[in-house]
Amino acid sequence: MAFRIEETFHIAAPVDAVWRYLIDPRQVVECLPGAELTEAPSDTVYLGKVKVKVGPVTAAYNGKATLLEVDEAQHRVRLAAEGRETGGAGSARMTMTSQVTVAAGGGCEVRVEAELDVAGKIVQFGRGMIDTVNKQLFSQFTQCVRARLEAPPAAAPAGAAAPDTTAAADHTRVAHRAEPVRILPLLWRALLEWLKRLFRGGRGPTQ
């Protein structure tokens, strides 16, 4: 089942800071629900896992993401990702392009375009439900990115040297273990969204 995703969100942070964040999978993965980075064989290839929890059942997926293009001048990055369910027949493939531009009112805009193809048990939920869940996950991702990039840095004591946080940040990323995406709450919110659209206007959709 194929999907196309187009989303745009605003971040009250400098373009360069947002760009540097988005091209570093070690940071981005911490805002991806259920995702975990396990290995980086090169500067452009990253291996990871995604866990999805439906009630008492947890499904795990192994995947690979490859940076196909990193355009510093246009602040545009393009990647391809693929994953396969461990112990199952489910799979997913995606190509995604993200671009950061200066926003007219300050801060910047991030535009994301993606082509997604999924197979396996997940397709039983139907296109509309999966699309709504995707939007819920994307909303969680943007909230997390804003929380990280829009928060003002803590002020250092006067005269004190700035601490070297590189090692600490690397340790935090290595130690990161993602909690499984719990699909039932997402499906519940997706169902509510679907019902709102169905009964909007009092008599449901006319198409």
Image (spheres, rainbow, N blue to C red):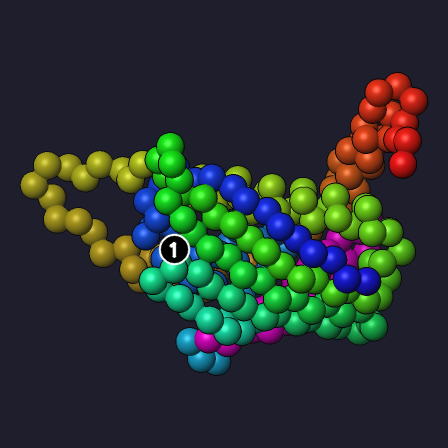
**Predominant secondary structure, magenta span:** strand
Identify the residue position indicated by label 1 in the image.
19
Q: Is residue 8 left or right of residue 149?
A: right
Q: 18 and 26: which one is in front?
A: 18
Q: Which quadrant is home to the C terminus?
A: top right
Please identify the quarter of the rendering in which residue 160 is found. Answer: top left
Q: Is residue 91 magenta?
A: no
Mark 1 is on which residue type?
Answer: Trp
Q: Is residue 52 magenta?
A: yes
Q: Which residues are magenta?
A: 44-64
Q: Is residue 38 left or right of residue 155?
A: right
What percent of the width, then of the height, locates residue 101? 40, 49
What percent of the width, then of the height, locates residue 152? 31, 36
Q: Is residue 121 left or right of residue 153?
A: right
Residue sitting at x 15%, y 37%: 157
Question: Does any portion of residue 39 appear in the rendered image?
Answer: no
Determine whether 190 is above or below 168 in the image: above
Question: Does any portion of residue 123 appear in the rendered image?
Answer: yes
The extreme bottom residue here reads: 41
Within 10 Å of disc 1 (Cα), the crowding (few <14, some 14-19, many 20+) is many
